[in-house]
Amino acid sequence: MLRIAVLVSGGGTNLQAIIDGINDGKIRNTKIVGVISNNLGAYALNRAADALIPSCVVSRKNFENRELFEEALLGAVDAVEPDLVVLAGFLVKIPDIMIEKYQGRIINIHPSLIPSFCGVGAYGLHVHEMALARGVKVTGATVHFVDGGMDTGPIIAQKAVMVEPGDTPEVLQRRVMEQAEWVLLPMVIDAIAGGRVVLKDGKAVITEE
Ligand code: GAR
């Protein structure tokens, strides 16, 4: 059984896709052992409560400095003893101490086709604003391993989504979620739980069942 900790900051629709994926058997052999939010007001916490999943809040506001916050965040993750840490709309830079300790065991979902529209400042709705401002005709989502950089770790899976004439950032965000994010993330977690994600020459590969 793959024990996963899911880190969230906001609405938690990707968390919901994981909960639903486990319940309907699309994600096999996996248990969410904890949801951790940096934001007390995150709706994702309601979703965790509804699914009877233990959750906690580690907010930067409650700590004197970044180092203490990062230690507390790592402590909250350690406390649930996860095999895999899933960043599902978690908008905090992951502390180096956590990356070291959980090397190769942290994944992130990003709402674009990396290396487009990623890195510092590219998160949430901003990513879709950037895609529309650039006038791309295809965008999508990426699930990747987290390393010391910002959105630079090995790419595990990507899915393309068409940009349509007249799209607003909100409309495009919704389409990317529906067509890519909520499909990709459960698929990758299931593959990791099945031991089917391997790293070869620094690149991630999903092997056949
Ligand atoms: C998602 O679109 C996710 O890909 C994005 O934030 C949103 C969270 O939505 N993450 C990033 O931009 C990370 N750089 P959710 O809380 O409804 O899952």
Image (cartoon, grey):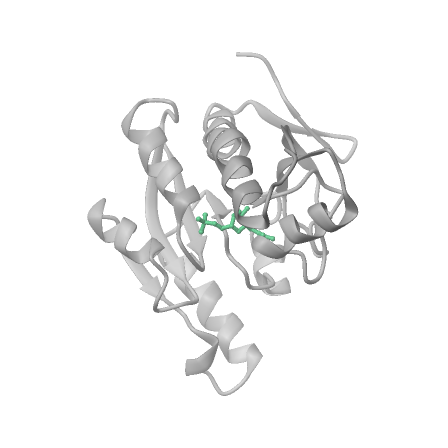
Q: Position of residue 45 (x, y in %)?
A: 31, 57
Q: Can residue 123 be seen?
A: no
Q: Residue at x 50, y 34 (%)?
A: 185
Label count reads 0
- Residue 109, placed above or below residue 160: below
Position of residue 147 in the picture relative to residue 91 (left or right): right
- Residue 99, placed above or below residue 162: below
Position of residue 126 in the picture relative to residue 41 (left or right): right
Q: Residue at x 68, y 51 (%)?
A: 147
User: Quarter of the image holding residue 57?
Assistant: bottom left
Nearest the viewer among 95 and 124 is 124
Q: Position of residue 35 (x, y in %)?
A: 36, 53
- Residue 66, placed above or below residue 160: below
Q: Position of residue 99 (x, y in %)?
A: 61, 56
Q: Residue furthest front?
A: 166
Nearest the viewer among 53 and 202 is 53
Q: Position of residue 20 (x, y in %)?
A: 32, 33
Q: Quadrant of the N terminus?
A: top left
Q: Residue at x 56, y 78 (%)?
A: 67
User: Quarter of the image holding residue 126?
Assistant: bottom right
Q: Residue at x 33, y 57 (%)?
A: 43
